[in-house]
Amino acid sequence: MAGALSLTGLVKRFGDEVAVDGLDLEIGEGEFFSLLGSSGCGKTTTLRMVAGFEEPDSGQILLDGRDLAQVSPHKRPVNTVFQSYALFPFLDVADNVAFGLKYQRASKDEVRRRVGTALDLVQMGSMSKRKPHQLSGGQRQRVALARALVLEPTVLLLDEPMGALDAKLRKQLQIELRSLQKQVGTTFVYVTHDQDEALTMSDRLAVLDKGKVQQVGTPSEVYSAPANTHVATFLGTANLWPATVTGADQQGVTCSVEGATLRIADHEAKAGEAVSVMVRPERVEVVATASGADGSNVLKGRVDTLTFRGAHTNVRLGCADLHLEAEVANVAGAPPEWLSEGADVAVQISPKALRILRS
């Protein structure tokens, strides 16, 4: 089946606006790859260029080494699932899924077999005679997926297909879609602005901003080791402060951060360098007193606000001039008794949890 996609130097302008600005990406065969970014970052335009709905001003789109530039959209071995699903209301589920096969001149037996297989893949075989208005949003999305998969594309493009669904259904379908992709082995390129979707489903993801790739990596790499401040703040919640490197030794560096001195396990920063320092809230440990901490980067603070989030409590606190956010696990179903608004507490941050960013 293959499905290795190579995007090189892609540029797309709309008038004076540069929507995609010299984009380079390598997407592997059978990979679930997500394009993640806010509205206007260029992710959907990139997807449309791969599909053939937009023509790049410059650059190459290679699928398994074949240049798609001169291949019309309906002849490209790719298919697209849109947010709107675009099902035909007058056709039942089976006929919606079979619609594209008429252009492949498949026999009736082959159409029946392929439609049945596609519907079974998305767990919709028992609803083949229903019309779209008789289906839930999640069921309509499954039919749209089956309609795309029945054509056996080399690459499946998905443009925010869960955008119209409620949060609970989206989480359920994220897991199902990931499992389906592994089952069929098709290369999936998924466009989303939802960081949870990208983290949950992707083998790798690219964070885009202003038409440029900011970082490419596995979800854990991009989340834990962001390349710059944009990635750090877009993907998840981050404590981010301006800082100055004040010293370096074999264990790492020390930084002056909002009046506090923090040790960081970084061996590339140099004394006197102006940087940004980041730590994720879940890696900030809150303890009742400083005597309950053991190690570097222990600071005394006072709780400003608490927000109950179910599995954890979000804690905003100040340590002198350093204001930060932390998460405390609700292992007993509620925050610890000593944790209340206005309480004096201490925080500890491992030097390995802190990261130095330069842009």
Image (cartoon, rainbow, N blue to C red):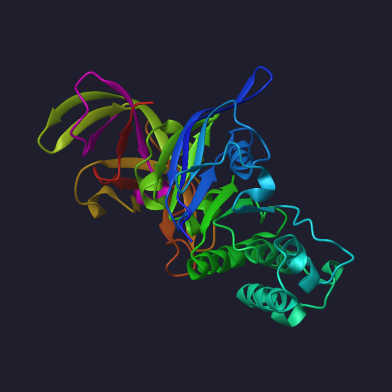
Considering depth in this image, is 357 or 190 the residue closer to the camera? 190
What residue span does the magenta drawing correspond to? 260-284
User: What is the x, y in percent for residue 290?
Assistant: 26, 48
Considering depth in this image, is 72 or 285 the residue closer to the camera? 72
- Label count reads 0
Considering depth in this image, is 300 or 79 the residue closer to the camera? 79
Q: Quadrant of the C terminus?
A: top left
User: What is the x, y in percent for residue 20?
Assistant: 57, 29
Examine the rendering and report whether any part of residue 307 can be seen.
Answer: no
143 on left or right of 225 = right
Q: Is 266 colored magenta in this rendering?
A: yes
Direction bottom: furthest residue: 126
313 on left or right of 153 = left
Q: Is 263 colored magenta in this rendering?
A: yes
Q: Residue at x 64, y 21 (%)?
A: 17
Direction right: furthest residue: 90
259 on left or right of 62 = left
**205 above or below 212?**
below
Q: Residue at x 36, y 48 (%)?
A: 221
Q: Residue at x 38, y 52 (%)?
A: 220
Q: In which quadrant of the rendered view does residue 53 lie?
A: top right
**100 above or below 58?**
below
Q: In which quadrant of the rendered view does residue 132 lie?
A: bottom right
Q: Residue at x 66, y 17 (%)?
A: 16
Examine the rendering and report whether any part of residue 328 can be seen.
Answer: yes
User: What is the x, y in percent for residue 346?
Assistant: 32, 46
User: What is the x, y in percent for residue 248?
Assistant: 14, 29
